[in-house]
Image: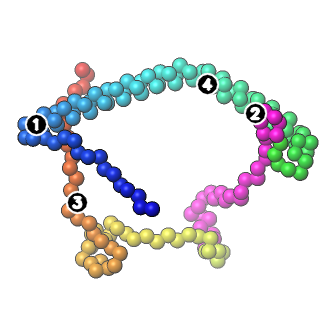
Amino acid sequence: MATKLKAKAQTYACSSREQAQQDIALIGMLQREHSRISGELNDRISALTEAEAPRLKELQDRIGMLQAGVQTWCEANREQLCGKGKTANLITGEVNWRQRPPSVRVTGEESVIDLLKRMALGRFVRAKEAVNKEAILLEPEAVAGVPGIKIITGVEDFVITPFEVETEGV
């Protein structure tokens, strides 16, 4: 089944240079209003978060205490709860024990890599190769005609930047 891509139809176009100038000024005004409203929202969110922080911390501390108590009791009674299994249904919820998959922690990666290589364990060292795009851009003629490499030039973006005056201390 093919997926249809839909683009929003253009519903407005400037009809003159003066109209474009007015619209750019309006874009600037609307962007500043958007920034003001976003700033006000962030201020309100910050104030709400700060006001509720003590209650949230109190709740989190209480949850932590209860979790520790449940875990202590469950671990002491694990065989009675689960038998040989790993899950127990306690009517109001379930507790379970899960074995984490094995993981590897490496500290001092450079010295570990060096040691693995000296011990003929280089198979545990990953060597990643990648195309150096920066070098290709410096010498595009050297890769001309290489299948799979295309140098893209002349892409143009259209940018509207309304003029604004930076004010300090106002």
- At horizontal 65% and vertical 74% (from top left) the residue drawn is 121
Q: Secondary structure at mark 2?
A: helix
Which mark, by number, is residue 103? none
Span shown in magenta: 89-117
Q: Which residue is the site of mark 4?
A: 56
Q: In terms of sequence position, does the residue under pointer 2 or pointer 3 come before the other?
A: 2
Q: Amino acid at mark 1?
A: Gln
Give the mark nearest the N terminus, 2 or 1.
1
Residue 67's label in the rendered image is 2
Q: How is the image coloured?
A: rainbow
* Position in image of residue 136 (x %, y %): 31, 71
* Label 3 to label 1: alpha-carbon separation: 27 Å
Instruction: Of the two numbered discs 4 and 1 on the same chain, state the one appearing first in sequence.
Output: 1
- Observer-side mark, 3 or 1, equals 1
83 magenta-colored: no
- Find the residue positioned furthest to the left: 17
Distance between the Cα atoms at labels 3 and 4?
A: 51 Å
Q: Position of residue 116 (x, y in %)?
A: 63, 71
Q: Of marks 3 and 1, which one's residue comes earlier in the chain?
A: 1
- Sequence order check, earlier mark of 2 and 4: 4
Which of the pair 13/142 is nearer the observer? Answer: 13
| Foreground tag (2 vs 1) | 1
Image coordinates of residue 113 in percent, x first then y, are 59, 67
166 lies above or below 131: above
